[in-house]
């Protein structure tokens, strides 16, 4: 009984309605519908174990680029702010949080529970202190409206067929003035042409091999976010040099000089837009919204 009371006291208010399992993972979600096959595939892949997480991550993401993007995002988060990382997977973006912003709490939400086990291995002692793991779905987050100061999502919303629903959910859980950032694979017509000339597949908005849905970031997504948030949206282009599709992984590595250069090249300038692997959209929830947007 004492142990239960103790645990209850440690749980922050934003998780108080969720049950915690023995692995420090809060909540529970059943995945059915259009993402069921993706969920099954991700659970299967996540049964693998890894000796070097960062090495594995660098095959899929540029560590230096995303570390810089996180630093920029954190500058907009108020003191003692709470961030929701939706589809946070292994949670690696937050591995240096205790150094930069020990005052900030991060809730990592993912529908693949086994990825959250990896997050716990990677983030170690931070889990249960300032980083919290939640088994949940981006399209129906189990948090009260107006819970978070920041909404951060990387290469997750691109897999959700109902983009508008995930943005509506982001808007709901953000506080007024809360910061929104979503990164997806970029749609670039010159890259599409290059892939076509090389006789390679360049999926834009489609179901891939019955497992994944992919919806690349395009102009229309920016318009949708701007309309729903009723707010100005800024776009950024990142991972300019990192090209895993062409087996060019080395700029993705931790402490890579190519990665550091790539991080500097990532910006809101359209100069490298055509070769950027990622496009992100950034906005804020207005302090006052008309009631229409709360429907
Ligand atoms: C490409 S991975 C990106 C992981 C992480 N954001 C990163 O940058 O390393 C996509 C992640 O989103 C999760 N995901 C996909 N759809 C989701 C949904 N509807 N709700 C919650 N998580 C989801 C997957 O399980 C996976 O961990």
Image: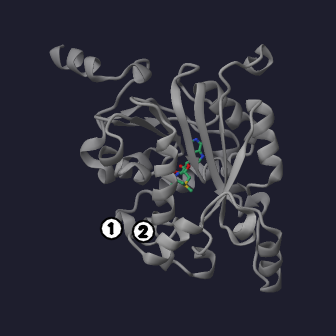
x%, y% of residue 115? Answer: 44, 50
Q: Is residue 110 above or below residue 263?
A: above
Residue displayed at 52% across by 45% down = 73
Residue displayed at 18% across by 13% down = 1
x%, y% of residue 116? Answer: 41, 46
- The answer to whether mark 1 and mark 2 are in CB contact below 8 A is yes
Left or right, 213 with respect to 178, comes to right
SS assignment at label 1: loop
x%, y% of residue 288? Answer: 69, 18
SS assignment at label 2: helix
Badge number at residue 121: none
x%, y% of residue 22? Answer: 28, 34
| Residue at which label 2 appears | 56
Residue displayed at 25% across by 22% down = 7
* Image quadrant assignment for residue 5: top left
Badge number at residue 52: 1
Left or right, 61 with respect to 102, comes to right
Characterize the local packing of mark 1: few (<14), some (14-19) or many (20 or more) Cα atoms within 10 angstroms: few
- Is residue 18 visible in the rendered image? The answer is no
Q: In this view, does 4 lie above or below 179?
A: above
| Nearest to the observer: residue 215 or residue 37 | 215
- Asked whether mark 2 and ligand 1 are closer than 8 Å, the reply comes as no
| Nearest to the observer: residue 84 or residue 200 | 84
Query: Looking at the image, which residue sits at the far bottom?
Result: 198
Left or right, 289 with respect to 239, comes to right
CA gap between label 1 and label 2 equals 7 Å
- Is residue 163 visible in the rendered image? The answer is yes
> Which quadrant is the C terminus positioned in?
top right
Characterize the local packing of mark 2: few (<14), some (14-19) or many (20 or more) Cα atoms within 10 angstroms: few
């Amino acid at each position: 009984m004492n142990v239960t009371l103790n645990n209850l006291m440690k749980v922050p208010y934003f998780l108080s309605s969720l049950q915690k399992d023995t692995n420090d993972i809060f909540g529970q979600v059943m995945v059915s519908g259009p993402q069921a096959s993706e969920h099954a595939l991700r659970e299967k892949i996540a049964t693998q174990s890894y000796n070097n997480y960062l090495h594995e991550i660098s095959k899929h993401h540029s560590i230096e680029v995303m570390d810089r993007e996180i630093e920029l995002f954190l500058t907009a988060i108020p003191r003692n702010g709470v961030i929701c990382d939706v589809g946070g997977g292994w949670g690696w973006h937050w591995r240096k949080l205790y150094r930069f912003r020990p005052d900030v709490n991060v809730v990592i939400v993912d529908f693949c529970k086994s990825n959250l086990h990896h997050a716990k291995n990677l983030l170690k002692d931070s889990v249960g202190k300032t980083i919290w793991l939640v088994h949940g779905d981006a399209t129906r987050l189990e948090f009260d409206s107006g819970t978070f100061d920041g909404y951060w999502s990387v290469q997750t919303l691109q897999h959700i067929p109902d983009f508008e629903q995930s943005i509506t959910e982001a808007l709901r859980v953000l506080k007024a003035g809360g910061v929104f950032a979503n990164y997806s694979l970029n749609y670039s017509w010159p890259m599409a042409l290059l892939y076509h000339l090389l006789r390679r597949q360049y999926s834009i908005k489609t179901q891939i091999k019955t497992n994944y849905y992919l919806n690349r970031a395009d102009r229309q997504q920016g318009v949708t976010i701007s309309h729903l948030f009723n707010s100005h949206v800024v776009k950024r282009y990142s991972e300019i040099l990192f090209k895993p599709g062409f087996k060019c992984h080395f700029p993705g590595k931790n402490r890579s000089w190519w990665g550091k250069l790539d991080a500097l090249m990532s910006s809101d300038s359209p100069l490298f837009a055509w070769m950027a692997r990622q496009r992100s959209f950034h906005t804020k929830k207005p302090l006052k919204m008309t009631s229409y947007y709360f429907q």
